[in-house]
Amino acid sequence: MSTMKSVRTGGIGTIEVVDVERPAPGPRDVLLRIRACGICGTDVTFLRMGGMPARAHLGGEPVPVPLGHEPAGEIVEVGAEVTGLKAGDRVVVNPQAAPAGIIGCGGKYGGMSEFLLIENAEAGKSVAVFPDTVPFDVASLNEPMAVARHAVNRSGAGPDDRVVVFGAGPIGLGAAIWFKLRGVKHVVVVDVIPSRLETALAVGVDAVVDSATEDVTARLTALHGRAANALGQPRPGTDIYLDAAGAPAVFDTVVANAKWHAKLVMVAVQKKGEIDLGGMLRSELTLVASQGYPTEIFEVTPELVEHQERFARLISHRVPFAEAERAFGLTMTPGAAEKVVVTLDD
């Protein structure tokens, strides 16, 4: 039996690197050698639960979860019935297309492994091919950038809109990039970590606000002009807010600043907090939720290729697979890293 190394949840807050059977592709499958895999906040959630939360809340012990849903790799074996794909193709993956469950999110397989089986492999559905001009670490951003793209698509933003993104993590900065590539006139990023705001400027946003030291209302009014809510109370002229932070303070700030008919797109996983429904009423604020990437998973791939240098700036740490424990530790430590990608070489 051939084996491979794979990362899964260990005890609460820890990972295990285990030897598991290397999967063999069937006639409709392909086998990938993983070259890079990003770490996501969802991985951190599983780690903090010590495994699959669904089992934990039933009173049983958490079940270990194979981790990694942001992989990029190279096809090394192709089933006899597979068409349109060949050995040597460099591909990104749609983790939600796996018959055995979402890759790295409770399914049988995780992308933080030396090899990954893609069942019922189909170009444009389960994988997408990208050129060898794109490094694997940048290609691994495909999945989170699809999340960010869906949020931007949900916003309906147009060229004349003035947009604010709260949270300069990978999703927030990815959304900011997509807004600018969409032709949006003015995009502001708000965060409390100066290094993140520097990255925001580097990827092309128009302005940044450090909400730990600056008056957000005053800055947005200076940047986006003066408007009003439905009662005529003064408000910044911001048209669209996007919450990629998930902190209750962000929601409160948006409601307090929203002009008449402003829009809030919620892409971050929200932490518990009270909602000022009266404030929403006074601005007729539209709340738009954004989850996953119903159509965007490979919609983003050509533009990720075209603008790879811009997206590459989102990666703060590249950590070899042999140091996976350090990689996950960085991600779990607030402020220690922005985007961590684990790399796997020969």
Image (spheres, rainbow, N blue to C red):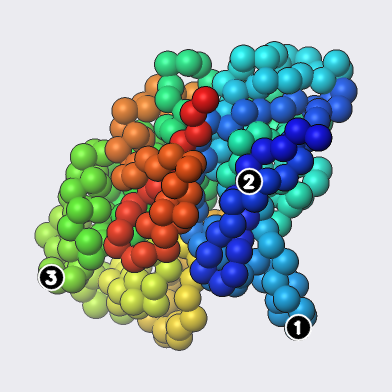
The residue at the point 51 percent across, 69 percent down is 13
Vertical placement of residue 172 versus 160, above or below: below
* Res. 122 image quadrant: top right
How busy is the neighbourhood of tag 1: few (under 14 within 10 Å), some, or many (20 plus)? Answer: few
**Residue 92 horizontal side relative to residue 261, left or right:** right
| Residue at image mark 3 | 213
Q: Is residue 60 something one can see in this rendering?
A: yes
- Indicate the position of residue 343 as horizontal and vertical percent values: 46, 36
N-term mark: 2 or 3: 2
How busy is the neighbourhood of tag 3: few (under 14 within 10 Å), some, or many (20 plus)? Answer: few
In three-dimensional space, the C-alpha distance between marks 2 and 3, rounded to whole angstroms, equals: 43 Å
- Identified by mark 1, the residue type is Gly
Q: Is residue 331 something one can see in this rendering?
A: no
**Residue 336 horizontal side relative to residue 38, left or right:** left
How busy is the neighbourhood of tag 2: few (under 14 within 10 Å), some, or many (20 plus)? Answer: many
Image mark for residue 6: 2
